[in-house]
Every structure is written in C-alpha cells, then in structure tokens.
Image (cartoon, rainbow, N blue to C red):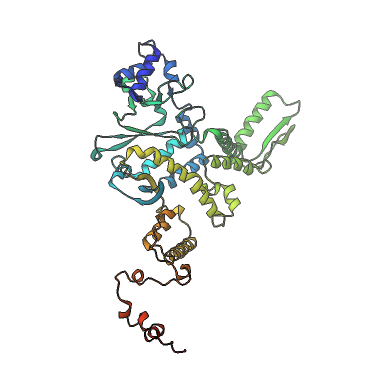
Amino acid sequence: MKRYELIGKIANAAVPRLGRRTEVRMGMDEWASYFDPNSPNPLMASQNYTNKSESVPNSFESYVASSYKSSGVVFAVCMARSLIFSEVKFMYQHMVNGRPADLVGGPGLSILENPWPNGTTGELLMRAMQDVDLCGNHYCVREGTNPSNFRLRRLRPDWVSIILTAPPSEAVQSDVAGYVYKPGNTNDSKKWTIYPLDGSKGTIVHWSPYPDPEAQYRGMSWMTPVMREILTDKASTQHKLKFFENAATPNLAVSFSEEVTAEQFKEFKKEMEETHGGMDSAYKTLYLGGGANVEVVGSTIQQMEFKSVQGMSETRIAAAGGVHPAIVGLSEGLQSTSGLNNTSYPAIKDRFDTGTLRPLWRSLCAAYEPLVDIREGTRLWYDTRDIAFLRDDQKKLAEIRQLNSTVMASLITSGFTPESSQKFIVTDDPSVLQHTGLVSVQLLPPGTVADSTKADPKGTDAKADPKGPANTPAAKAKATDTKPPKG
C-alpha cells in the first residue's frame, strides 16, 4: 500500500468528506498494525509514525521528579491553582438570544459529579489541573454504553499520542484522526488502545489550555518557559543547605609556610575537617598550629543578598503559573502587600479569578461538553458561587445588593414588569425586559386624559367608586354646569 493510500484510508475512517457516496473504513486491527513500530510492513517505519503523531516532547516523569516533588515553590504554585480550581461545580447555562442566562442542574451532569466509583468532581478537576501543569495536556475517556453505566477514565498524558491524518510539515490539511494510549509507552501494539473520533472505543476529550507553538494540537506546560528559574531556585536551596553543612560559615582558605610537609598538610586537613565540619561544629573556636594562615573567601548570605536573588526566581515561577506570590505565600508577595489584610489583596484575588481561573474553567467546559448530554439552548458551564475564596467581603456584597435593588425599583417604576426586571438583574441582558405599557404621567403628552379602561383592566365604572373622579369637585361642577367652589 502506498503512503498516500494509507493516509487516505485513515482520513476516510476518521474524517469523512462531504459529497462521497461511499467510504472505505479501516478496521481497528488494521489501523493499529500500521502504527506498530515492530510491524513487518516496510511503510510503517518509526519515522513515519513520528511524523504523523504528536507526543509529549519533554519527560513527564522528569517534570514530576525534578519540579513537582522536589521544589517547594513549584508545588505551592500548583496547589494554589489546583485547590481553588477543583472547588467549582458544573452546571447547565441557558442561552437566550446568544447571551448567557441562568444556571440550572440536571441528571446529565452526574457523569462529572461521580466520574468513577467513589470519585468526585474535585478529584477529577485536581487530576485535570495536575496533567496540564506538568504536561500541558489532559485526556479523559467516557466509557459505557448508556448513562446508567457511564464512567470516566483519566489517561496519563505522556502515554498518549495524537494521530494525525497527515504530517503537519508536509500537508495543509492535517486533522486529528484519533488518539493512541500506550501504557508505559510500550512498543507492544497488542497493549495499545486506539480511540478514534467516532466514539467506537469511547468518547475521548483533550484539554490543552496552553497551546504549544511548535505543535498543531498539543499543549505545553507553563513550567517549560521557567525551567531555568526552577533550577535556579533549587540550586539556591541547595546552596543554603551546603552553607549550614559547612559549619554555617563562609569559605576559608588555609595556607601554610614552605616548611610544612605534604604529610603534615594531609594530617592537618583531616583533623580540621573532622573537628570543624558540619552543623554540629558551627561557631567553634578554630586553633591553628605554627605556619598556618586562615583567610575568609567568598561572601556570606547577607553579602550576596541571598533572599532577593532567590525571591526573584520564586516570583517568576509564580507569574508563569498565573498566581500572585501573595496567594502562594511567598515572601516577596507578602512584603509587597504588607500582609493579607492589605487593601490590595482583594484586587490580587480578583486578578487570579478573572485572569487565570475563569479562562481555564471556560476552556475545560468546552472540552468536556462531549461527555455530557447537552440540552437544547444550553451549554456546559461552571458555578463559582460556593467557592469561599472567591467571595467578596460582606461590605462589597451589601453594596452590590443595594445597587441591584435600586436598579430594579427604577425599572419597575418605569413600567417594566417585576419578573423581567429581576431577570435583567441576573442576566445583565436588556433584551429580556418586558414593558407593561404603563408610563409615568410626566411622559404623557400635555392634555392627555388617562384611559380608565387601562387603569382598570376589569372595566369597573369609575362613578361607582366613592373616591373616583365622579365625586371630585370638578366632576360635580361639570354635572351641574356650575363653576367649582373656590378653595
């Protein structure tokens, strides 16, 4: 089979073209055989497979081992992102004339509320954020044939490859044909699971909020651009450790006169390291024999402004993660805000909410929509009302409620229905307002007489009302054709 024929069969299997009366579908076993590096098929060389797939370019395990599990700053930034991100709830949101409206729940969201046995939404979101932080990609598969036995399965991102219909470097039309999951990155194709886009092996979704500019569909970890800063921070921490291990003093240079022999030098060096090395020997008095001269070399931690040097790396790592250092609890962030009760802290929280969390929630909802049953006129959305971290202070909430009450009262006074006025407050959409047709007398043209039938929908005779217009002095004067009494 020629190369272009293979690409055509994959394209027909995953992305059928419009206008074709028939299509030749490729079986899953046949498809897998072409992506097996050990296949005897000469067309399926490993180079061809690499060109038509997008895998994680860096080592997922190295990011976990060298950053997540060994850098306190990286772990703190990841936890600040994950713990708040996982507090959100999934809801349906009605769309009215293309505008978002109210949030409602529904049984179709149960797959996200209980993704696997004993699993919760928070655990699913923690895993999703963890995958994106460390790998830039999150893959999730919905298994099952009907809603009663649906479950989600998270795929380890570095064991997933994105299969394309053509190499991006050779073709303009390079689409996603499916995904291949290789446990342990094994080359044994019998252990692979291939997920085409038609859902025959389960509905798979891919979330990559930070696109990799060198790939067509693959995402990138936010740690990649600041990997040098992470290494610098780890080196600074190691430097502090070595400082205390070496008696918590700066480096010393010991020189001897020419009369000291090599054997005497080795004996003195051994004796000094045994009696003055390590933290237990810190600040001990140093006694030297004749001919020895000690000189301090290097700088102390204070002289190097060590705190400022390490603080800059911490701040850059937090900035790459979209988290202010004050939220993470880093020293520079706390100094800049003079503590968490500073007036600038609410603005910092608002920046983290609107600039980092909400774009991530929005993109995740778009990625997860194929997993749930989307009702007509709705979309999958998130609900942040129960997240304590994002709640405004009570004074600000009271001001907002007072403002909404004033706006609603003004709308009702202007003739809009109370129901539509309330809906406007919730949706901020002027098109939902409905007018009663009644306006203030100041808006009526001069000389306009109010229609009694509009004022009284039941058509009650105004004369029957003892306080109605028929009993006014003007009405009585008109009835008797006399002038109304003065006063």
Asked if one can make out residue 415 in the rendered structure from this viewpoint, the answer is: yes
Left or right of 257 in this view: 173: left
76, above or below 155, in the image: below
Residue 134: % across, % down: 46, 35
Of the pair 70 and 198, the residue shown nearer to us: 198
Residue 18: % across, % down: 35, 25
Of the pair 343 and 297, the residue shown nearer to us: 343
Of the pair 233 and 129, the residue shown nearer to us: 129
Toward the front, the furthest residue is: 481
Residue 271: % across, % down: 63, 32
Asked if one can make out residue 88 in the rendered structure from this viewpoint, the answer is: no
40, above or below 69, in the image: above
Residue 262 sits in which quadrant?
Answer: top right
Q: Quadrant of the N terminus?
A: top left
Residue 199: % across, % down: 30, 30
Toward the right, the furthest residue is: 258
Please tell me how many numbered marks the rendered image carries: 0
Left or right of 322 in this view: 31: left
Of the pair 170 and 286, the residue shown nearer to us: 170
Residue 153 sits in which quadrant?
Answer: top left
Name the residue located 69 percent from the left edge and 38 percent from the top edge. 299
Left or right of 369 in this view: 227: right
324, above or below 144, in the image: below
